[in-house]
Image (cartoon, coloured by chain):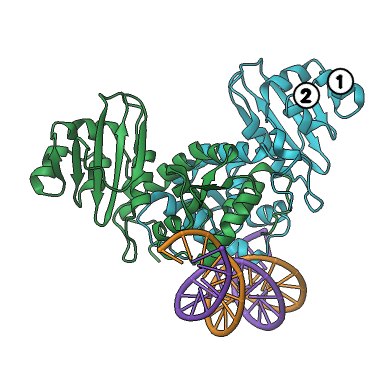
Chain colours: A green, B cyan, C orange, D purple
DNA sequence: CTGGATCCTGCCCGATACTG
DNA sequence: CAGTATCGGGCAGGATCCAG
């Protein structure tokens, strides 16, 4: 890991967070502590040796802690690492402003979907509910509180409402829920009245420029 | 620039911000628009071809805009790039928690000092003043408003107070100003009564662990 | 099966020299 | 001033192998 040669907090942060895969690993750990293979399978494309190296780097930097639970290795954020939570959430929110359609090679993952729920939770107060969200192959669920949200990867059969479909991004961007459901872009099961609450609780605006990049070259 | 293969706002952000030097360049542009050679000289160690490449990448991503002013090329943050401001400030604040003494190869730069003033401005309301800060070879100045601050690199001979010395980090961490001045760790010129205001307006806490890394290996 | 380690290939970074 | 050209080395990527 190479220094930027500057006595600067941002430079120090960049030294570790600028390493490839670091931010993705931290995003997954922000949702919850995980084992090595959970991280590996949750992050498609990461070479196992790089995952090893990054986890060691993050541990040396005091951001991640390695512990043994139930005779298994578990990685979790340290207190210092938890301090990155608000930064990651704001950064994800910023990135999603230009996140229109997925690129050819992109897939949603359970973790990225969970992270999307985390970053898009507004401060709008709603009545509490639980929701399972599906986007292609990805599934995540959330317990929405009056203010705030708890998220996790995977299914939740006991959720009060189940939301999915290709129109999810549009819904988060502020599209009309009824229209999306009528078009079949968004599917709802369970307590359908909660769709309105969902649309109020989660919001990820989309820049106009997202579809027309400034650089035509 | 390689994709992470995930349909995720944070992953998209990581693709561009995770490239080496990206965050440092953006930090400098956050303080103000700059010309190519200003960036080059302000970022010690960056190869000129990488600066070129990064600026093009950032431009393609819609974060930086290249314009001609006075027959000179000027780089500035786009509106989308400005949206990174709060993220960079929070990230710098997070990084500075472990920023104790400079490492062997580290120097403060004008830009990093300016960024430090930006990130460490508290929301404490103070009476407005102007200050020039010196840390080793680095100089920056700030106009402190009742809430908020404007910063820039370099000297400001018209500043109301001039603060410098090796004890600056300790002062920002909450050390007693009078003691630091008495010890010679902090030097003050101009309106010395403003040192108290400075100490209230700027704060960058230091983790206890900063001096004793968890990984002894 | 988990949690890695090892090896090889190729590309990106870094340093320096050069140019419109 | 604002970049381009070039070249060596090191880290990333991918496959495979190994220990508890």
Tell me if residue B13 can be seen: yes
Image marks 2 and 1: residues in contact by CB distance under 8 Å? yes
- Tag 2, which chain? B
SS for dot 2: loop
**In which quadrant of the rendered view does residue A56 lie?**
bottom right
Q: Residues within 10 Å of mark 2 (few under 14, many from 20)?
A: some
Quarter the N terminus of chain A occupies: bottom right
Query: Which residue is nearer to you in this view: A200 or A156?
Result: A156
Mark 1, chain letter? Answer: B
Q: Is residue A127 above or below residue C12?
A: above
Q: Position of residue B34 (x, y in %)?
A: 62, 49
Q: Position of residue A47 (x, y in %)?
A: 49, 67
The residue depicted at 61 percent of the width and 50 percent of the height is A59
Q: Are marks 2 and 1 on the same chain?
A: yes
User: Does dot 1 land on a helix, a strand or a loop?
Assistant: helix
Residue indicated by mark 1: B179
Q: Looking at the image, how many numbered discs can be counted on the residues?
A: 2
Q: Residue at x 66, y 51 (%)?
A: A60
Residue B175 is marked as 2
Judge by depth and name the residue closer to the eye, A204 or A68.
A68
Picture quarter with the C terminus of chain A: bottom left
Horizontal side of B37 relative to B65 (left or right) equals: right
Residue at image x 21%, y 40%? A175
Outermost residue, left direction?
A: A182
Dot 1: few (<14), some (14–19), or many (≥20) neighbours within 10 Å? few
Q: Position of residue B67 (x, y in %)?
A: 52, 53
Residue drawn 28% across the image and 32% down it: A201
């Amino acid at each position: 890991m190479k220094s930027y040669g500057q006595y600067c907090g941002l430079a120090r942060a960049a030294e570790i967070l600028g390493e490839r895969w670091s931010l993705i690993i931290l995003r997954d750990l922000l949702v919850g502590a995980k084992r090595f293979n959970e991280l590996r399978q949750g992050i498609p494309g990461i070479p196992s040796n790089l995952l090893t190296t990054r986890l060691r780097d993050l541990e040396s930097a005091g951001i991640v802690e390695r512990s043994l639970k139930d005779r298994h290795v578990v990685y979790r954020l340290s207190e210092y690492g938890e301090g990155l939570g608000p930064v990651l959430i704001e950064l994800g929110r910023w990135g999603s402003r230009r996140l229109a359609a997925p690129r050819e090679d992109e897939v949603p993952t359970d973790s990225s979907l969970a992270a999307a729920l985390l970053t898009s939770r507004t401060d709008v107060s709603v009545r509490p509910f639980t929701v399972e969200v599906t986007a292609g192959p990805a599934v995540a669920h959330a317990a929405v509180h009056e203010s705030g949200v708890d998220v996790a990867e995977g299914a939740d059969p006991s959720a009060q409402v189940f939301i999915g479909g290709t129109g999810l991004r549009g819904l988060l961007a502020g599209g009309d829920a009824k229209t999306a459901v009528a078009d079949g872009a968004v599917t709802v099961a369970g307590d359908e009245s909660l769709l309105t609450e969902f649309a109020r609780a989660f919001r990820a605006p989309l820049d106009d420029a997202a579809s027309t990049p400034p650089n035509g070259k």
